Amino acid sequence: MPPKLKKKVAKSFSHSVEKLISNVRYPPKQRNSTPPKLNMAFMSHDFANHPTTYLVKGVFVAHEASPDVAISVFSYGPDDGSKSRESIVNLLGDSSHGGSFYDIHGKSNLEALKTICDHDPQVDIIFDMQGYTLGTRPELMANRCAKVQVNFLAFPGTSGASFMDYIIVDQYVASIERADEEFTEKLAILPRSYQANYFVDPISIPERGSLEWKALRHRENLSESSFVFANLNKVDKIDPHSFSVWMRCMQQVPESVLWLLEPSIPAAAEIVKKNLQIAARDAGICPDRIVFAKKVGREEHIQRMAAGDLFLDTFYYGAHTTATDAMRGGLPLLTLAGESFSSRVGVSLLHGMNSKKATSLVAYSVDEFVEIAVEMAKAQMDYRGEALGRKLIDMDYSGDGDNHELFDWKAYSTDLDHLSRMMVEVKELTSMEMHV
């Protein structure tokens, strides 16, 4: 869907939201003085065992004892009992015991708005980490409890809403020149990848050919001699066009297999797998060359990434959290630069890993995508990873995460603070709307 059409659809939906709440509004608390701290709030359905929580946790950790910034969280999703949820609650403290984690899941819109709008001190800037994804409650943002409201992290596209002031982006996923075509929000441009990440534990990546690597391949039902193209997104991200291009890659690399994530819904798993195998067979690829990975915990999932050789991105809605998990685990990403935010995330993430080498892994046409994938596969198969293929994809993934801009969560949090202050100051000091 072209960006202009996405924007039109989003605007239509946001208008329906505003009509829905026209008789259910709650006035924000009036401020008598400017507080010494910047009061930032984050709202989402997904403070749970969910990628949003994995990504944003570092922002909260970075502000644990901040003298300049206060963090509040408003959670309208259910408590799933996960360690991810528990870690955020413990970090911020439950509001019922004086903390800043507010569980508004069981509250009506009016009750939830009272909690947000009456927050003391008043929220300066609120980040919507849901957009139009599963579980969203856009009515809460439409009330405008904060002076500045921001579309952040979870939804890679415009809200189309008059009640959203900014969207957090970077130079790779959006441009000022095309902003009016794609967004109703003004752009808030980070000097690094827009995507927050939080990795603190070192990752040990086995060398290709080592006993550890061979054991890993064996556990995942992957042959030691195969070149493993991978895409470990949820299968609902796999569109027919992307899949057909992956088949083109496999046609030119007979020793290759495609490693996909098994569907998570048991009732649909066999049907989905069968359909993918039929599509492969129709493309002249033996269905046995598609290998499915079982769903495992996140830590194990990241550690097994090294069993793959090259992650092939989807084209319309690319890998986000899955892409950073892959690269953190030593699996290189090949992406196609699309025309919208959701299809350019891979470009942003690769530049965050290594700007100099990213150019080798970003394609600007389908033919170039296939050419790069096949070249890398054949080089690795021919030279056992010692020549061109390995040089192209060796981006130094090891270490504690601070070696790469993409994983530097402390610097990311500092940049987000600076950008937040700019958004608030623009709102306070001028009536103009502008990119920052």
Image: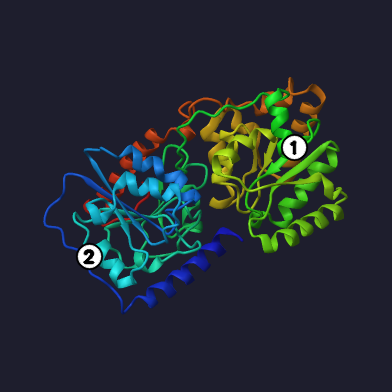
Which amino acid, by three-letter code, is at mark 2? Pro
Is 377 in front, or is 436? 377
Instruction: State whether residue 169 appears in this view.
Output: no
Secondary element under disc 2, as helix, strand or loop, is loop
| Circle 1 residues within 10 Å: few <14, some 14–19, many ≥20 | many
Which amino acid, by three-letter code, is at mark 1? Val
Q: What residue is drawn where x is 27% and y is 51%? A: 100
Q: What is the spatial separation of the Cα atoms under label 1 and label 2, in whole angstroms? A: 54 Å
The label number, if any, that marks residue 338 in the structure image? none
Instruction: State whether residue 164 appears in this view.
Output: yes
Query: Left or right: where does residue 143 sit relative to residue 251?
Result: left
Looking at the rendered structure, the number of numbered marks drawn on it comes to: 2
> Which residue is labeled 2 in the image?
28
What residue occupies the far top of the structure in this picture? 386
Tell me residue 254's x, y (percent): 86, 38
Query: Left or right: where does residue 260 sit relative to residue 330?
Result: right
Q: In the rendered structure, which disc, 1 or 2, sits on the residue that comes first in sequence? A: 2
Query: Left or right: where does residue 139 sit relative to residue 350?
Result: left
Tell me residue 275's x, y (percent): 78, 59
- Color style of the picture: rainbow
Identify whether 302 is placed above or below 168: above
Secondary element under disc 1, as helix, strand or loop, is strand
Quadrant of the image occupied by residue 388: top right
What residue occupies the far bottom of the structure in this picture? 23
| Circle 2 residues within 10 Å: few <14, some 14–19, many ≥20 | some
Is 247 in front, or is 271? 271
Identify whether 160 is placed above or below 389: below
Q: What residue is drawn where x is 41% and y is 50%? A: 85
**Viewer-side label of 1, 2:** 1
Q: What residue is drawn where x is 47% and y is 53%? A: 154
The label number, if any, that marks residue 228 in the structure image? 1
The quarter of the image holding the N terminus is bottom right
